[in-house]
Image: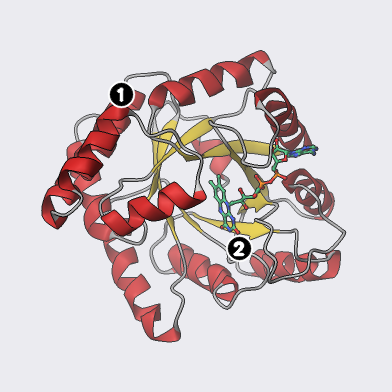
Amino acid sequence: MKIKDIYKQNKKSLSFEIFPPKKDTELESIDETLEVLCELDPDFISVTFGAGGSSNSNRTIEIAKNIKKRYGVEPVVHLTSLHYDKSEIDEFAKVMEAEGIENILALRGDRTPKVAEKDDFHHASDLISYLSEKHDFCFLGACYPECHPESDGNVNDIKGLKKKVDSGASVLLSQLFFDNERFYDFCERCKIAGIDVPIIPGIMPVINAAQIRRMLSICNATFPERFKRIIKKYDDRKEALFDAGLSYALSQIIDLLTSDIPGIHLYTMNNPVVARRICEGIRNIV
Ligand code: FAD
C-alpha cells in the first residue's frame, strides 16, 4: 500500500520510526522490538538509513522487507542520496522494487567529513525527480518545524520544502519538536506557501538523560520551560525521568490529536516499552 493512500481515509494515522541495530549481534533484538511494535497495529513503520553507506544502511531494506513479509505492516525505507551516484541509487531501487517495497522517505542525508559527497543529488527533491522517472514509488519527505539547521531562515526553508513537494513528495514527516506551537506555526507557513500534502508531526518521548544530552547537541528544537523543569528535577532519577518524559510526550500527542493533524509519527528509539505505553495512553483517543 502506498502511504499517501492512508491519508485518503478518514482517520488519524499512527506510525513508528525504528533504526537498524549497529552490530550483527543485535540483529535479533530488532525482531523482539518489531513483535511488540507490530502488535500495536501501526499504519506504517519507517526504517532509518545510515548516511554514506554506514554498516547498518544495508540492513535497512532487509528489515523493511521483514516488516512487510513477516508482520504484514507497511514499511517506509529512508534513503539518503548525497553520498551516492545514480548507479548506486538505481541498485537500491532495484532491490526495493524486487522486495515489493513501495514507500521511500527520500532524503539528502547529513553532511559528514567521513564520507565524500557525490554530485548527482544535492537535495531530496533531486532524488525524488530522478527515481519517479523510472519507478512507481510513493515518496515521503522530511520537514523541519523549527527550520533545517543549514537554512538561513523560515522563508527559504519553506521555499525548499515547496520544491520537494512539487518534485513529488506526497507526505511529509517532521523533525522532532517539543513545543507544539512551533509545529502549528510551521503548518500555517506551509499552507500559505501552497504546501497541501499531509504533514505528520514527529514525536520523540525523551526518557533518559543521555538521550536529552544527545538531543541538545544535534537538534535545534526549542525546549519549553515545562520540559526544562522536568529535566532539571528528574535528571538523576531514572524511573522518574522515564515517567515524566513519557507523560510529556503523551500530553504533546493529545494536544496534537485534538487539532487538525493527519496522524502521529513516533520516534521509538527501538524501545517497545515506550511505544506500548504511548499507545495505551491514547487507546480511546485515536
Ligand atoms: P533537503 O530536502 O535537501 O533539505 C535541506 C535544506 O535544503 C532545507 O533547508 C530545505 O528547505 C532546502 N531545500 C530542499 N530542497 C531544495 C531545493 N530543491 N532547492 C533549494 N533548497 C532546497 N538522515 C539520515 O542520514 N538517515 C535517516 O534515516 C534520516 N531520517 C530522517 C527522518 C526524518 C523524519 C527527518 C526529519 C530527518 C532524517 N534524517 C536522516 C536527517 C536528514 O538527512 C538531514 O536533516 C539532512 O541534513 C537533510 O535532509 P533533507 O532530505 O531534509 O534535505
Residue 253 coordinates in the image, percent (x, y): 31, 32
Callout 1 secondary element: helix
* Residue located at (40% from left, 79% from top): 27
Quarter of the view holding residue 80: bottom right
Label 2: few (<14), some (14–19) or many (≥20) C-alpha neighbours in 10 Å: few
Of 29 and 13, which appears nearest the observer? 29
Q: In this view, does 255 lie above or below 284?
A: above
The disc label shown at residue 131, or none: none
Residue 132 coordinates in the image, percent (x, y): 79, 49
What is the basis of the colouring in this image? secondary structure
Name, please, the residue furthest toward the right: 119
Answer whether residue 61 is visible to the viewer in this image.
yes
Quarter of the view holding residue 170: top right
Residue 114 coordinates in the image, percent (x, y): 68, 71
Left or right, 1 with reference to 236? right
How many angstroms separate mark 1 from mark 2 (CA)? 36 Å
The disc label shown at residue 255, or none: 1
Q: Earlier in the sequence, mark 1 or mark 2?
A: 2
The quarter of the rendered structure image containing the C terminus is top left
At label 2, the amino acid type is Gly
Callout 2 secondary element: loop
At label 1, the amino acid type is Asp
Name, please, the residue furthest toward the top: 192
For ligand 1, tell me if the residue under mark 2 lies within 8 Å: no
Answer whether residue 268 is visible to the viewer in this image.
no
Front label number (1 vs 2): 1
Circle 2 residue: 100
* Residue located at (27% from left, 55% from top): 209
* Residue located at (18% from left, 48% from top): 241
Quarter of the view holding residue 135: bottom right
